[in-house]
Amino acid sequence: MIVQHLTVGGLRTYGADPLEVDLAPLTLLFGQNSAGKSTLCSILPILQQTAQHPETLSLTGPMAGGSAFRSAIHDHDLNLPLTLGLGWKGTDHTVRSAAAEYRWDPDTARAKRNHLILGTDSDYRTVSGSPAQFTADEAALVSKFAVEFRDVLDRSFHLGPMRARPDRTTSLSGIGDNYVGPAGELMTELLATRPELLTQVNRWCDELELGYRVKVLSPTSEDILATAGDFTVLALEDTRVEPPLLVSPTAVGYGIGQLLPVITQCCIDSDGIVIIEQPEVHLHPKLQAAVGDLLVDTVTEGRNQLLLETHSEHLILRLLRRVREGVLNVDDLAILYVDLHEDGAAFIQRLELDRSGELVDGWPGGFFEERLTEVLPGLGVDR
């Protein structure tokens, strides 16, 4: 596991007092809309973006989705601090953490770093001011933490809730990577340049019974290559008919296009953390449940740590079933419920699981009661 916890304070629904959110190899976020699930998913992208110029918080670029500080700070109060950070296990197996507190500077109209909080299992230290003001000891400490901190960020991959529909043709840049992109826009090039990855993706297309396999076609005309440069054509092979028929990715259901980047990213062995918002979007219930097996395989085979935002009861129930069957260790699964206090500040409750894959205290706040409401309205849960 690469990330032990995330630290957040003052960002959107989260109050100014920082929270440490412990993660497992497979962590699920669920709860009411606008409670703060997507905010947790945005922490690592914001830190990635800010790492380029760490003394100034960057919220407006492509990684973080774009937001002005006044919109992002809790209660829109420019006097509050905003704190972001993470904890990780270092190369010497020591758990380290780093968090930065930012405050609004009206003179520069920027959120400037006020201080760093650096810690290990047994000791924490606050470093204030700009790098020019650090003592020699402080500079050495910050440098030591920064190397590992950036390594964690370099191995963090975020997939947003709406993935781009695969294009039929894609120009090849020749730049290899382990990331399909925040909207899956780089998936085709990865599959075209990594045949072993394409094999793994198609194995999961079969496992999930999609009825399609991915084909990457190379142009054969020298005239085309001479005028258009290197490019590839993505097609889907409809395996429900005999012989299988090649079709355009735009000719199949929207859900397939949404799922393929998820499958691809989960199949990449990057030894990092993959953050996926709504992996189940546009999928029918049976397939939502089956995606749970892809997630289990990803963490049990050690390819990646996963942090997922989901609204899918079917997916969660599949994971609980795999715990019950002994396929997934109960300690490798964390289910976090995100909701709001009466004052509008977010809180996070980790649901306790037993070894049989049952929730010890049930679903909080009547979550997932809708099925009973619709089927058995006389039981007193109708609204």
Image (cartoon, rainbow, N blue to C red):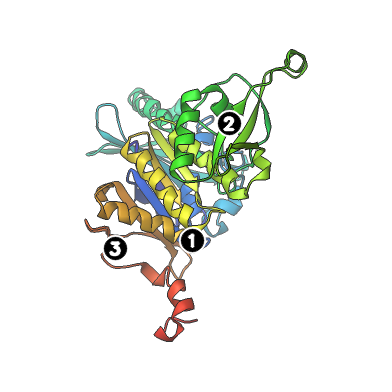
Q: Position of residue 156 (x, y in %)?
A: 45, 35
Please, is residue 94 above or below residue 9 in the view? above
Which of these two is toward me, 376 or 361? 376
What number is the disc on residue 359? 3
* Mark 2 or mark 1: whose residue is earlier in sequence: 1
Please, is residue 28 above or below residue 150 in the view? below
Amino acid bearing label 3 = Leu
* Mark 1 or mark 3: whose residue is earlier in sequence: 1
Of badges 1 and 3, nearer the viewer stands: 3
How far apart marks 1 and 3 lie (CA) works out to 22 Å
Residue ID for mark 2: 215
Q: Position of residue 178 (x, y in %)?
A: 49, 28
What number is the disc on residue 35? 1
Which of these two is toward me, 56 or 383? 383
Which of these two is toward me, 22 or 118? 22
289 displayed left or right of 218? left
